[in-house]
Amino acid sequence: MNNPHITAFKFPNELEFLYKCFYLSKDTDLKRQAISKVRSYLTKSPIPHSIEITALLMEAMLEDETQTGVKLFKYEERKTFLTSSNNPTATDLNIRLQYSMIMVKFVNGLLDPFQQSMFNISLHKLAVELKLPNYFVECRHICTHERLPSLQMLRMITQRAYQWLRVEYWENILNKYKSLDLLEVNETRWNMSLMNVKRTHDLKTLQQKEQNGDIFSKYSLKEVENLLKSIRKDRKREIQEKVKLQSVVDDTNKLKHLIDTKNASNIIQIMIFRNVLLLQTEKNHDVNEKQLVGMRMIWGTILQNLDVTFVTKLWIELFKLSTSTTLVNYGTNYVEECIINNKPIKYLKSEAEIRQCENWIKWILENITFIDKSNIGEIVQLLFTQSNASRICVPILNNQYSALLTEVNCQEKIATLEKTIQRFWTNETNFKKRTLEDVELNILDDENTNKRTKTSINLFDSYSSWRPIPFGCPPPI
């Protein structure tokens, strides 16, 4: 693969525009515009020799027409013709010098790059390799070492060089661009391509961040929500028609895969705060027993088929939420923002949601065996939080996991906790209802307080007996 080259032009169709101006247009102003365009390219970076020479040849011929009145261009198919001058008395030395210098530059610029041996090769031999007619080399030799050719001869040679460049360079390079479909690339298409590249890069970056657990994309959020909606719809149909649907099994397996590949904590928050396990009620209306039974019938079977580790995390999150005494009113946008940014949601919105949490805590503890030696210590520690949830869970834990509690030496702790609950704990009914802004301000205040109370660390130890002494003087004894 060839190395890329930096060009002065941005798109290949700019070369096509120059070609049309130089060879196809009859408008002199367009030709001069193309010459100015080439000059502007030269200020940016080096350009192909053939483009520069084409502009110089065109400029010389236009100057010849202006000064002598001769008509050098007659548009008849792809040929150009030379007509006689209408002003034969005009001086032609300046024009001859201009033509001569351009022809010297034309030949030298084409052949000199091929002089790669230790000794110079004949220009005629190099011209044969490049398929450059020998009369161009002869003209270059005459212009350099002999008397200047006549104006008529220089006009003829110039026009032949002009046409040779058209066939050997312009049409050749444009055909290559056309075969690669590059001539269709313009500013609009280029910007669209850049947008596609940027979109692809952003998507890859998003996927990488999601794999690292830094974020949870909106696409993943919608994917999980749509899957949960599909499971709920099919489970309702199973319950109503008393049938088993393969789609429920397939969707449950998909949910397991998402739990394994995505951030499980985010999926837990979706199940809790996006109207899956907890029904979002209006005006703090409580959920009746029929609704609770329906929710357990729909999602209970699904939870029983999920990984025990995930169920443990779900139970702990439900327990922590149910023990909070602060209720915060927030919208669905806040929930979505927290899930996407991996920010935990620590508060529920109503007492009805707390009661639903307590209901799920009790059901999961009674119907799913998820407690073992690895997590029973953490769960027992959670139960020491004074709450109605602890009051519900302690008897169930004592009855169903008594052997495990004895094995890990937690039976005495549970017995002490039961006595404490019976004697001293009261039902917590005083909830603090706060706005989201108040909660966030409190968090900031706590962070600032922690910053102010941090102990300062000195780079050097201080000594009370230190006395300043001039540099170079020994300290006093």
Image (tube, helix red, strand yellow):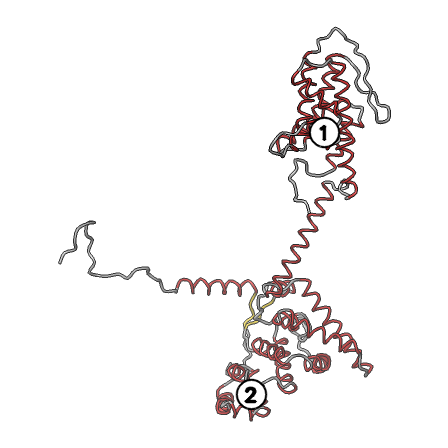
Q: Amino acid at mark 2?
A: Val
Marker disc for residue 10: none
Q: Can you give x and y, in whole percent of width and height, for residue 414 in the image?
A: 51, 89
Number of the front mark, 1 or 2: 1
Q: Residue at x 63, y 81 (%)?
A: 308
Tell which of 418 and 106 is nearer to you: 106
**In the image, residue 104 above or below residue 240:** above
Q: Is residue 30 in sight in this rendering?
A: no
Q: Residue 6: which quarter of the image?
A: top right
The residue identified by callout 2 is 394
Q: Amino acid at mark 1?
A: Ala
What is the distance, in whole Å, between disc 1 and disc 2 at their CAs? 99 Å
**In the image, residue 91 above or below residue 297:** above
If the image is split into quadrants, where does the C terminus sit?
Answer: bottom left
Tell which of 44 and 330 is nearer to you: 44
SS assignment at label 1: helix
Tell which of 355 and 166 is nearer to you: 166
Q: Residue at x 19, y 52 (%)?
A: 469
Q: Residue at x 63, y 76 (%)?
A: 352
Marker disc for residue 127: 1
